[in-house]
Each structure stands twice: as C-alpha cells, then as structure tokens.
Image (spheres, rainbow, N blue to C red):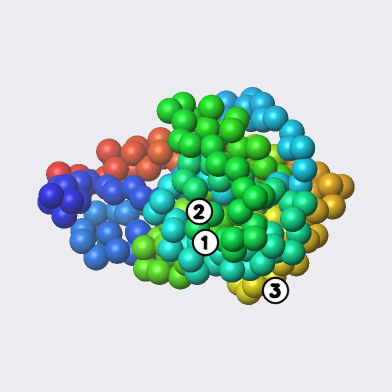
Amino acid sequence: RLRECIEAADMVTTTTEPLARMLRAMTNAPVVVIGNYVDKPIFKVERKPTERYTLGFAGSYSHSGDWAAEGRGIGRYLARHPEVGMHFVGTDMSAHLPGSALSQVRVTPWLPDIHAYYAAMEMDVRLVPLKDTPFNSAKSGLAVVEAMALGIVPVATDCLAYRGLINDGKDGFLCSTDKQWQHALTALKDPTLRAKMANRGREKARQWTIQKQAYRWQESYRFALDSPGRS
C-alpha cells in the first residue's frame, strides 16, 4: 500500500535525506525533505529543577538496542559517580546499567499528554544514544531539538542525525567512544558550563519550531500544485 500511495502522489515529503533517497527510487515525483520540528508551546513548559546533577533519557523500548550498544560508557560513569542521578522517562533502560548504579536510578512512566511528558524531564543532560543501523541512519534529530528547547544539554552519539544540530562542545556533545561519553558527562557536571550550553541550545531551537518552518510545507505544496506534470 505504501508503494501504491507514493506512486499516486504528485509530491512526497519526508523528514530526512536518507529516507528521501529511498523514496526517490519508488517515484518520479518530487521528494522534498522537511524536517521534524517542535511546537512553539514547548518553550513555555516549566520543569522542576534537579536536586542533584542528573542524567536523563526519554524514549521508548525501541531504543533498547541503542542502550546495549552505547550504554557502557554511561554506566561506567554512573558507577564511578554515585552522587549523580539517572532519570528514565518513558521506558526504564536500567537493565543496561551496572548493578552498582541502580540505586541512582528513578523512572517516570509514560504520560498521556505531551506537555506533561516534557515537564517530567527533570534532568540536566539528555542522553541520546543511537546504534549504527540502517533504520537509525534515517532518523531525524527531534530528540536533540526537544532537549535544547527545554533547556537540557544533549549528549548524543556522533552520527548523521545529530551532527547538523549539535555544535560539539558549544551547545551539546557528540560522542563516538566511551572516553568521549565520559568526558562529556564529566564536563557537564560544572553548572556554569551547563547553563551556558543550555542557553545556546535553547536559542538555536527557537529556529526549529513548526511555526518558524511552516513556510516549507506551504512552498512545497504550492510547487506541487503548480507543476505542469501534476496528474
């Protein structure tokens, strides 16, 4: 059915260039990349301040493989720093952490309202691990944009999805080795540095709202409507 719908379309929109390349092999119609953006009200979400330096993750069980691949460095950091907290929002990934770090973990289950979900992200750093797989290579960087918009510093796997969003060492960190994860999490324990990076990220995220980027849909659909080859 997906192929039939694509073949019938005068234009196809998708969220990343890797997905666009796959779709272009299925149609002669224009395929336009329009990213995933956040809704402007996210900037009004009020989160409780953390009581101690807290790392966090927000997401579903589909990221279990990402944690299996990238969680070792995170787990080692927590084991060496028992004063640091770990907050899972949505899905509990603590099975990927060493047993000695489990006392540092708290879990907030899924919430039905998106703004309640954002407000529950009581964390100073949002961990965004991503395993190198074909599926993940086509993902967008929405998790990073959400973190920045909420004033949370993202620390993410160094991959295509996040390289165009994070200015490494300025508004977040990109990590490809355990050593880099350790360095990033240690550096961000400094509240002054963390505040500077969070402020930079928040200002950057203001450009990545649906409201700011709505013109992209408008221009794309106008192009499709005006195309002489439209069926």
| Amino acid of disc 1 | His
SS assignment at label 3: helix
In-image side of 95 versus 153 (left or right): left
Q: Which residue is mark 1?
A: 96
Q: Which residue is mark 2?
A: 93
Q: Identify the residue at horizontal 54%, vertical 37% (top origin).
A: 108
Q: CA distance from mark 3 to mark 1?
A: 18 Å
**Are circles 2 and 1 on residues that touch, CB within 8 Å?**
yes
Residue 7 rendering spot, x and y as whole percentages: 16, 53
Residue 148 rendering spot, x and y as whole percentages: 65, 44
Q: Give residue 169's quadrant in the image.
A: bottom right
Query: Upstream in the sequence, badge 2 or badge 3?
Result: 2
Query: Upstream in the sequence, badge 3 or badge 1?
Result: 1
Q: Which residue is mark 3?
A: 179
Pick the residue in front: 198 or 13.
198
> Is residue 12 something one can see in this rendering?
yes
SS assignment at label 1: helix
Quadrant of the snapshot with the C terminus: top left
Crowding at dot 2, Cα within 10 Å, few <14 / some 14-19 / many 20+, comes out as: many
SS assignment at label 2: loop
